[in-house]
Amino acid sequence: PRFFQIYFMFNLTKIDKNKKEKMLTKNNKNQALVDKLIQLKKERNAVILAHNYQLGEVQDMADFVGDSLDLSRKAAKTRAEVIVFCGVQFMAETASILSPDKIVLLPDINAGCPMANMVTVEKLKEKKQKYGYPYVVCYVNSAAEVKAESDVCCTSANAVKIVRGLDQRKKVLFIPDQYLGHYVSSQVGKEMILWPGYCPTHLRILPQDIARLRKDHPQAKVIVHAECRPEVISLADEVQSTGVMCRYAKTTENNEIIVGTELGIIHR
């Protein structure tokens, strides 16, 4: 299971652009490829975005590293003409929606999110009709066409706030992550209709993993993503989005942190 202890935190998004290119030139073994990427980026006036879950060497080449929505917002504020999004399909779609005047490139056009693929517009329409057209709260980790069929979108960081602000007399259908939906339901105190979707990676984190690591690191704080199963969340000290996890690791006085999310974030 992808469960790790962090002993340091290094965030490339805070590094000056010129210093970063010098660092890459000095340390990277694939120097010819690095030089070509840097040159192409300048020629095309491009900005490179890398999601928190990407490989470390991909994050090192990026101008910005973060979660999908935050990256798209940052790219929209740049003067770049081209956005290279090192992520999956729904992330590139979000970037295109927020930057309609920019070209958005996805390095691997087949890169998809299993959870995002667990909901389709057709199935969503059927579910809405079945439950009398409830509010549809859509997690941003979804395809653009699914978002368009929803009433409101949310992130893992603001999902509780979004649901709490809805008319509590009306039913809520939360898509596509049932575990994030379960967490939101527990925080708001409102029973919701949960789509049977999930993140395969977060589902692999088990309660026994927490118990084992707590035994080995009794002083460590446990922070997990809200996409984890309820039994894992109940054992954590904090439930956080990936962006909050990075800020927490930079500011906490704890020397050890047990992090429950995808491996790539450890590089940050």
Image (tube, rainbow, N blue to C red):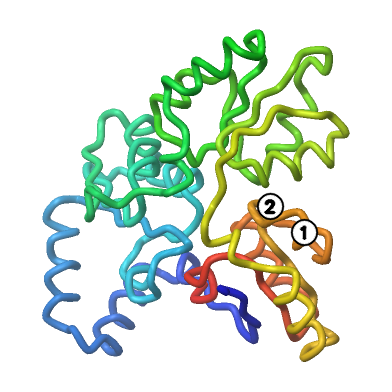
Label 2, label 1: how many angstroms apart (C-alpha)?
7 Å
What residue would you read off at disc 2? 226
Residue 260: image quadrant is bottom right
Q: Closer to the N terminus: mark 2 or mark 1?
A: 2
- Residue 20 location (% of width, % of height): 35, 75
Viewer-proximal residue among 230 and 251: 230
Residue 192 against residue 159 in the figure, above or below? above
Characterize the local packing of mark 1: few (<14), some (14-19) or many (20 or more) Cα atoms within 10 angstroms: many
Q: Which mark is residue 233?
A: 1
Viewer-proximal residue among 99 and 45: 99
- Left or right relative to 54: residue 14: right
- Residue 183 location (% of width, % of height): 76, 45
The residue shown at (38%, 45%) is: 75
The residue shown at (84%, 29%) is: 190
Mark 2: which amino acid?
A: Ala
Helix, strand or loop for disc 1: helix
- Residue 238 location (% of width, % of height): 79, 61
- Residue 126 location (% of width, % of height): 51, 16
Characterize the local packing of mark 2: few (<14), some (14-19) or many (20 or more) Cα atoms within 10 angstroms: many
Mark 1: which amino acid?
A: Ile
The residue shown at (80%, 28%) is: 164
Q: Are marks 2 and 1 in contact (CB under 8 Å)?
A: yes
Residue 228: image quadrant is bottom right
